[in-house]
Image (cartoon, helix red, strand yellow):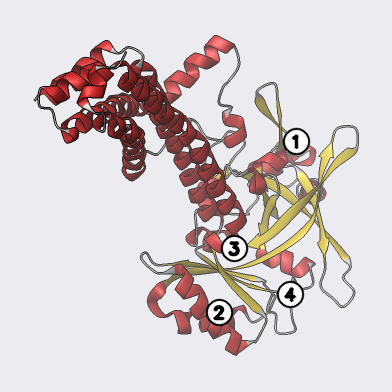
Amino acid sequence: MYKYILCWRYLRTRYIALASVVSVMLGVATMIVVNSVMAGFSAKMRDRLHGVLADVVAESYDLDGFSNADEVMARINEVAGAQVEAMAPTMETFGLMKIPFPGGKSITRTVQIIGVRPRERARTGDFAEFLFDHRGRKIEPSFEVPERLRGASPAGQILQDLPPDDPFRKELEEQARQQVPEHGAIVGWALATIHRDGADEFLAPPGTKIGLAFPAAGIKPAPAYDDYATIGYFKSGMSEYDSSHVYVPLEQLQRVRLLVDAQGRGAVNQIQIKVKPGVDLDRLARTIQDGLERLRPMYFRVSTWEQKQGPLLAAVSVEQGILNLLLFFIIAVAGFGILAIFSMIVVEKTRDIGVMKALGASNAGVREIFLGYGLLLGVVGSGVGMLGGLTFVHYINAIEKGLSRLTGRKVFDDSIYYFNEIPTLVEPWTVFWIVGGALFIAAAASVWPAQRAARLHPVKALRFE
């Protein structure tokens, strides 16, 4: 019983030990907050990356693709069995986009042009979840140009006031078709806007006629060009995609790129595949790869969405690991503080230890006093740190708003990440390992001073000056 009484007394009276408690507390709290925020960002990013790409993607090495898409999809169904839920043929190519600018000028941007059938593509991922109009409202996955956009052109506005039998109506209808292209395009949000004065200003508002240039098929690739009307915006929250992706009708892109064969089949260079829940994606990708190799050897590459985004996901994982390592040094410093404090206490209490041993205290009993004291410091520090860290994570967005008002500038700029609030994800196992690691360091730091105190000879300890 005396061991616990002494541990508690030392904790209440040795105020220098509070430095170690505070160090452990700050280390544990900081690691919980950082891991929760990093895990939240990582989870959000993975969700959005997975939403942009299907579960599995089968693509050709040739940019011009393959015209037997139905045969390829039939082969995938044959080898994958009932594991496939939906598929969508896609044509993806690089190109240039021209956006008209006041004064007869234009802005040219490099883009990734993706030809899809919007409703089929929506069934293979979260494509429909990322489609918005200029007011931020969800829109249906479609490339049809609404009549209201045709009416927004000068000829369209005149048409609204003309009677149906007016002799000039046919000519004005033709002008309206020329001013607003027949085919619609969904443009990446960051491509169509510029962020200025805390708001997004549209370079390509709805109905804007944009020009796309891309390589046509052939032995000697020649440039092809087509006009589209902006009808919506793709806003995934991933700047890499929002600043480069332009979605257009698949059949129109095939015609302009000269990818329609004599049988009227259009070529595609990707098959986006959505699989049923619980399927092992890596194993399925290998199965599909083997099946397509028999159809056309060394022509297809089959990847899961994680494999296609491997470098980015790996970079996030490495960053999180390095941050954890650096932050763990805070707790390690607290461990060295406990070691130094305990060594000082052993020297200071040498005579007291001698008295205890003379009264019958065993070596193990003396050792347990210091080990218990170190563990008690770790329990108090890590316990308070855990509660503080979890509380901070719970109120992190309110804290961010308060700091923004205090500093006069946004601490978390949602225009960069497109998140309405700071994402957090508390993983119980991570909290367990952080608290457990802090307790282990606190206990380990007290081993050497405890062993030193236990080995003191009672006579020599009583004579210590």
Residue with the most extreme bottom position: 294
* Residue to which mark 2 is pinned: 289
Residue ID for mark 3 = 117
> Rounded to the nearest whole Å, what is the CA distance between mark 4 and mark 1?
34 Å
Quarter of the rendering containing residue 395: top left
* Residue type at the position of mark 1: Leu
Discs 1/2, front: 2
Mark 4 vs mark 1, foreground winner is 4
Of mark 1 and mark 2, the one earlier in the sequence is 1
Look at discs 4 and 3 and give the one toward the viewer: 4
Q: Which residue is tagged 1? A: 203
> Distance between the Cα atoms at labels 1 and 3?
26 Å
Earlier in the chain: of badge 1 and badge 3, it is 3
Q: Secondary structure at mark 1?
A: loop
x and y, in percent, of residue 216 in the image: 82, 68
Q: Quadrant of the N terminus?
A: top left
Residue 383 position within the rendered picture, expressed as x and y whole percent measured from the top left: 28, 27
Q: Depth check: give the residue in front, 181 or 328.
A: 328
Tell me if mark 4 has few (under 14), some (14-19) or many (20+) residues whose alpha carbon lies within 10 angstroms of its own: few
Residue drawn 41% across the image and 80% down it: 81
Kind of residue at badge 3: Arg
Whether residue 416 is situated above or below residue 111 in the rendered picture: above
Badge 2 marks a residue whose secondary structure is helix
Q: Report the Cα–Cα distance between label 4 and label 3.
A: 21 Å
Query: Residues under labels 1 and 2: Cα distance?
Result: 42 Å
Q: Earlier in the sequence, mark 4 or mark 3?
A: 4
